[in-house]
Image (tube, coloured by chain):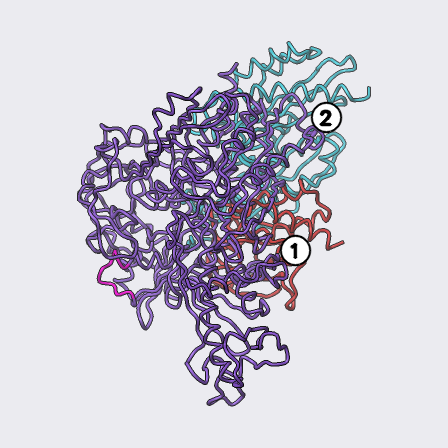
Amino acid sequence: MSQSIQNEIQMKQSSTARHIGKSVQRVDAPNKVTGKAIYAMDIQPNHLLHVKLLTSPVAHARLIEVDIEKARQMEGVEVIITYDDVPDTRRGQFILDQPILASEKLRYIGEPIAAVAAETPELAEEAVNAIKIKYEELPAIFDLEEAFSKEPHAIVHDDIQSYQFAKQGDPRFEKRDHVETEYENRPNLMYSDTLNVGDVDTAFNKADYIIEGRYEVKALQHCSMEPHVAVGQRGPTGITIWTSQQVPHNIKTELCMAYPDLLPGELEIKSPYVGGGFGGKITPFIESILVGILRKTLRPVRFQLTRAEEYTVGVSRPQVIVNVRDGITKNGKIIARDSRILFNVGAYNEQVFRCTISGPSVTIGSYDIPNARYTSCAVYTNLPKYAAFRGFGKPEVNWAMERNMDKGAKKVGLDPVEYRRINLLRSGDTNAKGEVLGNVDTEACLIESSERIKSIDVKNEYPKYDTDEWKIGIGIAYGNKPVSRASAAATVKIQKDMNVIAYIGAPEIGQGAETVLTQIIAEDFDIGLKKIRIIAGDTSNSPYDRGPTGSRFTYHTGNAVRKAIVDVKEKIFGLAAGEFGEGIEPIDLRTSDGKIIVKGRKDKWIHINDLFSTYGQMTGVSNTMLKEGGELIGTATYDSRKGGKHHAFWTPVGQSAIVAVNQITGRVEILKIVTAIDIGCALNPKNVEQQIEGATGQGIASAIYEEIIYDKGFVTNPNFKDYRIPRTMEMPYESETIIIETKDEMGPYGARGVGEMGMIASAPAIGNAITDALSIEFDTIPITPERIIDALDKNN
Amino acid sequence: MLSIDHMGEYHVATSIEDALEKLSRCENDSQIIAGGQTMMLLIRQGLINPDLLVDISKIEQMRGVVENKENIRIGAATTYSELKRSSVIEKEFGYYKDALSEIAGPQVRNQGTIGGGLVYGDPALDTPPVLLTLDAELEIQSLEGIRRVKLEDFFVDYYETAIKDGEILTGIIIPKLPKLSAGKYRTMTPRHGDYALAGVCVRLTLNENKECICARIGLTNGGDIPKRAITSEKILEGTLMHNEIIEDSVKCLGDVLEINEDIQTPKSYREKVFDGITRQTIIDVRSILDGVEQ
Amino acid sequence: MSGMKLDINNKIYTVNVSPYKSLRDVLRYDIGLTGTKESCDSGVCGVCTVLLEKGAVKSCLIPVGKVIGEKITTIEGLEIDGELSKMQQAFIDCFASQCGYCIPGFIMAATSLLEENNKPTIQEIREGLSGNLCRCTGYVKIIDAVKKAAESEI
């Protein structure tokens, strides 16, 4: 990026900003409170066909035959597809391991075998029931640790050596050759990532104490309120698929790879408002089947997962097991850490490889540990597939890290806050991976969150819990969360009267992207918020965007938008200078509310409309046609991968909680939870609170409520009744957000990402609080009432 | 998007006689629907496929809470929300409100009826244990006439009650409680509004000497049917209910509890919680009565 | 049942569907009022909440034959002559909506709550909304919005 553009982007950091730093009303709110907002669930063309799946009833089997003859004749059936009807490709991110429909093997209960498209969902279901399959059951493996072993009793992908690897969006493929650790020759290992810095074993020998533990996170489900749904329609130029997805461009890329004869221009993906994603809506497991059907009919086709199918055909957050050893001195300094992390992939990879790479960064990202080692492994099992969930594995690993920190503090007799403070990485410090931490106030996050909790007079604030039944506990935790480097592009178009349209590749999934981008654009042009329209999530008109994933959207797309604005301003000012004449240079100009003004000369201006043509217009100025140059468009890429850093930025969070535990029932009430985050710049403070409250809520859910319960590979609780997704009475109303603003060097207006941050330390803060309340260590989440009563019983 | 295209008949009955007549004339599969909170799910899951639904929710004779001299009559089609608002219930056995607050959520309570829950025979519902502590009777009507059944005889087996084809549960009759009575309902649910993992309703009646002359302990989700812990009750009766006696009473819960092992919730958990909440609830009711003026 | 007349948002709609079809599906697919949503399809999540005269109900659990002749209000019926209801405005002002999918259901449940109890405590608001699920917000600002709407009615 040139220095002038960088300067341009860095300007306006002050408090005289017109829109930045203000809690402006969300631009999507009026449509959402009136029922006018359209989601993919609401798209209903006429003459729809409805899709139902035949899925595998067994966890592992050789598939011998699929007989669709009877089903094909049934009333209302238009299309049935099986493996024979789709390309003989495997799709995937990173490793191409997944057929579009099951071929020779069935690898999990719920694996799609055939898809029926019929006039109504009932008729499709009846046809599904008429499909006959023959299979030969094989031993199946569910236990993660056993699956990881050198001699598991079952191997999920026995032909994995023949699989190819995918480079995202890049048609070149790589052969598998990356495994270089002592963990080779583990037949269910899909991938492993390692780090070895310093001299860990010598440091352990020198340590005064070894603090170690095995920590487990059980699987849970995204539970987006809008289920996965896709509606495909044939149009004049090809197929359009409306779908509830976070990354339409990724869907398109993966579909074109899975269907090699599809030309990119023949397929467009559109995501309108998305009813929640959280990482579960990134890969095309339903769209890949939908395309197979669309190629066999001219009718529009709708494919929606039932809520039960969300747990089997859909994806969930993986079970993770972490073994960690800390070597510490008696003064509380951590001098060595060794972590072994197992991620459960499920039967096929949907993003878990990404968790395997990014999850372990929290082992070395929060504290100064000069001798550090980790091995992070993605392991196949015969379970329904897992994917990333708000944090890409970091919250799961941080559960282990922050529980182990509390044990270390206890061992040396230090307050848990002080123990962390001693070891904390601060701005300018280098972590074990050699990354220098940028401009953040990590200590403020740790201290302000814990001080707030300590300031509460618990007995007076919560008298209801001052009885024999209840035990109160206080817990704190911390995490420094990195955000991966990425690349994003944006296009802005200026129209008559300074109306601005921005074309953004990523949809609004609830995080407030539309609003924040609107604020940035309005600020950079110095115009009102209502002048701006964001057209988002449509591959037919937007440039590439990695989507609202990994807390990287505001930072990358925000910067891309700012660069695109600089680009279009060059055109505006170039044309305007011509209009002014009199030796006015482009550099002398600025925009403000539809005017192009000479800097320092408020009286000397032209209107933006003076650049537009009046050709052929009965009533004045063209909406879109300039006198010179066509449309007034600016476009730009922002790529944070330049500059040699491992990550784009780090956002620290400190979280603390007060809990009450009932000793008769094991129920846990969260009385208060506090999050302190150094966001760099709160572009919209209320929006920051929204994200923190939501992510913290999901962290609470992971800590004490939610668990997918399997019985030999069968999901026993695939509904909101038996699966304990929390309601209003289960979540604390007292969820506080403390915003700290130490400006990021490169973020838009100094802003960093926030989406995932509330997840990073909330579960361990609660786990530490429950441990404090009962003086019993809990190493597995969720800490359910059943587990609490069992632990209390064993303790007595 | 489950569209139900099954074309059946839907009859909104205007009186009990009208409902009974309609049911008797139907040759095919007919069902009674009250609030519909359970019925709609059964139809969608394909477990029930009726040709006729007779809706009894708008029959005036079956709605409302009426206070008589000796008892309270609750119309079977009264919704849980209406019961929650009833000042008669508040006055006569206000502890039923503890249970009403635990039933699902506000929307389900606006539709769901007390009769619909009873006839369904689900042992995990909150209302039956409360009514068992009140010695309730049920009023059942058919074309042959009206009969009364004691609630404790109504639950036959898992989801099976004493109601026969062609009969409608029309009312619940609750005798007024003697003076010096108090009660409490307590339940442990994973989330508020869920089915109870363990629940108990305790009602105690004392004499002037503070001796317990009547003890009723109703159990929620304690077995295949809603039931009372009869041996536990007998231990309390005739005593001043000191803590040791309460211990003996709670020990007898095992006589009636029939809990299955469940993959999410072990049997041992539910047994321990029944133990703990029954003990605490008996103590709580005793405390309420300690504070009552003679 | 042919020629079934439904009174929705003070308008009469005539539909030809099975009386067992859920009110939710009739609203969304036969009439085209998609503001009422679908999610769990088992009566737990509340995104399908609409108002009858008796209060908020889950439209996925109402067979349409049950509500002929009753006044039904959906989210689309709260805005009158371009003016949002106090509850809708409070949801905007308090940043209660994120992905927004659960919001129509919450607004209907909250509207019913205030009709029954116009001065609810925080605890009463939480109980009154315990039939609705949200995944995005942690409920905090939804509760704030209901509180604000209650205060603005006085």
Circle 2: element type: loop
What amino acid type should be assigned to the residue bearing mark 1?
Ala
Colour of chain A in the image: purple
**Quarter of the rendering occupied by the N terminus of chain A:** bottom left
Q: Which chain is cyan?
A: B
Question: Would you name the residue on which mark 1 appears?
Answer: C90
Residue A173 place in picture, x, y as percent: 22, 52
Answer with left or right where residue A520 lies relative to residue A164. right
The residue segment tinted magenta is A256-264
Check whether the beta carbons of the residues at disc 2 and disc 1 lie within 8 A of each other. no
Residue A536 place in picture, x, y as percent: 45, 63
Q: Chain of mark 1?
A: C
What amino acid type should be assigned to the residue bearing mark 2?
Leu
Q: CA distance from mark 2 to mark 1?
A: 46 Å
Mark 1 burial class by Cα count in 10 Å: few <14, some 14-19, many 20+: many
Q: Which chain is red?
A: C
Question: Would you name the residue on which mark 2 appears?
Answer: B177
Circle 1: element type: helix
Q: Quadrant of residue A729?
A: top right
Instruction: Decide: is B224 above or below C39.
Output: above
